Amino acid sequence: MSIDRRTSTVYEFEDVKIDCRNFQILKNGEPKRITPRAFEVLLFLVENGGRVVGKDELFESVWKESFVTDNALTRMIKEIRHVLGDDADAPRYIETVQKRGYRFIARVKAAAEKRIDDKRENDDVISSIAVLPFSNVGADADGEFLGEAITESLINNLSKLPDLRVVPRSVVFAISDGGGREINPLNAGRELKVRAVAGGRVLQRGGNLIVSAELIDVKQEAQLWGEKYQFKSADIFDLQEEISQKISAQLQAKLTPEKHPPPTQNAEAYRLYLKGRYFWNRRPHGLFKGLKYFEQALGKDENFALAYAGLADSYSTLGSWENGGLPPNVAMPKARAAATKALEIDSSLVEAHTTLAYAKLHYDWNFSEAEAGVKHALALDRNYVHAHHWLSHIYMAQGDMERSLESSLRAYELDPLDLIINVHLSWHHWLARQPDETIALAEKTRELDPTLIWASYFAGLALEQKGLYEEAVKEFRLAHELSPQMTLLRAALGNALGYSGETKEARKILVELEKERSARFVPAYDIAMVRLGLGEKTAALEWLYEAANEHSSWLAYLKVEPRLDALRAMPEFSNLLALVGLPQDH
């Protein structure tokens, strides 16, 4: 009963209707919520109804180049059955064929309407676009961050258009290798599988900014529009807006981005803000430099909301468990104050709403308010990647693995080459106690960037979870060599050394961390981990209570952190859970 999707846009079976054009499932006429990937899996099964579809075929057809595990597919089938009201033991729609795959067994009626991909086939309509990095062709170093800022502005504006798929920032910047080099737009468009490509060049000469921009139809191999602009550098706001409006008009979109007033009237403040975001995107190494530029921008305009949002992002990262640059009880109140100030100026800033929710989770341990804050951010921008990212964290902290994975995969779908999101998937599977998936994902992330410490860090944690302590030590040593200043990595190494029997070296690391703590901030949680690896449970708990005094963001995950399993039977640990607001499972 194979169905040709190209001639069908609506499938019906019993009380269910699948609307392919609007990516919607109706059950008894009522819309049902389903994740995008689960929708694609269901659609593939329906279109191949009556025959057994193997797991490998599903992986190849639906996920293609993305990494996915058997467990993830099983959970996705479970989600589909829940949406349809199906029963695995007495299936009406999806039958599990042991050791082979799945078979769709319901009788389907397919409506032969317009081609589902008629937008793609219609030469007059464009439904997908990539904005390539604007290349810096001048000697002025400022041209690099200005070109990047114009590119990001266009991506953000075009993402607001209905029925238009815009390739995420990380994907297009990966093509250029971050070098600002010029790219063949037709080749890039074909590689990214988009109908149109926008891009251009930036040349700064003194106080003048010269920008050439063009829009290319990849299918027709033709330029739809091209223009050159010469502005005073102070007019960069008008430049970004004009380019965005021009491209939007050429796309014949139903709605064009609304013209907003510039975020600040001070051109130098905006220039400093752009530098701040430029270095923010290169964290952790560029973090303090980015923070400095945000502060300088506010020195030029104290009512600049975007600069406050950048400041909030910087402080929240500095106070996080993964950075440890500042004590959380110093950094997080500053992050919250900056985000609050940003929202007083502009209540629609999704970044500021998300940062406030981050603080609610990691500093206040207020899980309900954190969830409400992230969902408010998603109501403002449903495609904001890090809102989905933090929603996954909120669900994980409370032990809701399924919803955490759903949010994780949504973030990954929106930006599959973002290194932090790839790392986040490893983090999820580690806390979900799926070490094999963690290791596989860490290796995939390492392929994207061999110098990324987090691939080795999470691979080490997963190996330790499997009891492979010597292999874990090797990974932690590699991470430590890549970033020797991070105490988090030394603590993980000390923990694994202790478990592997290398207690002399583990104790040396412990002594070093405790000595350094008298001179600079060393998170108490890090010391607790080394104590735990040495088998000193009581001392480890004492340091965890000190971490609570510091408001360590690690404490939000007490309920699920695998390394703490050795302490869970102790009454003091139950008290610690209660202090954070997490119930003890029985």
Image (tube, rainbow, N blue to C red):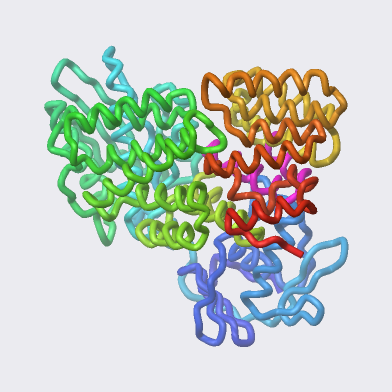
Residue segment shown in magenta: 418-443
Q: Does residue 421 belong to the magenta stretch?
A: yes
Image coordinates of residue 267 in percent, x first then y, are: 16, 31
Image coordinates of residue 330 in percent, x first then y, are: 43, 36
Quadrant of the image occupied by residue 169: top left
Q: In the orientation shown, which residue stands out farthest toward the top?
A: 139
**Res 453 visible:** yes
Q: Nearer the viewer, residue 66 or 57?
A: 66
Q: Does residue 435 belong to the magenta stretch?
A: yes
Left or right side of 496 for 281: left
Image coordinates of residue 368 in percent, x first then y, are: 50, 63
Residue that appears at 49% across and 47% down: 363
Which quadrant holds the N terminus? bottom right
**Res 242 visible:** no
Quadrant of the image occupied by residue 84: bottom right
Left or right side of 470 for 481: left
Residue that appears at 45% across and 36% down: 172
Left or right side of 319 for 565: right
**Magenta-colored segment: predominant secondary structure:** helix
Residue that appears at 32% across and 56% down: 161
Quadrant of the image occupied by residue 221: top left
**Residue 85 to residue 21: above or below:** below
Q: Nearer the viewer, residue 527 or 487?
A: 527
Which quadrant holds the C terminus? bottom right
Residue that appears at 34% across and 37% down: 310
**Residue 316 to residue 90: above or below:** above
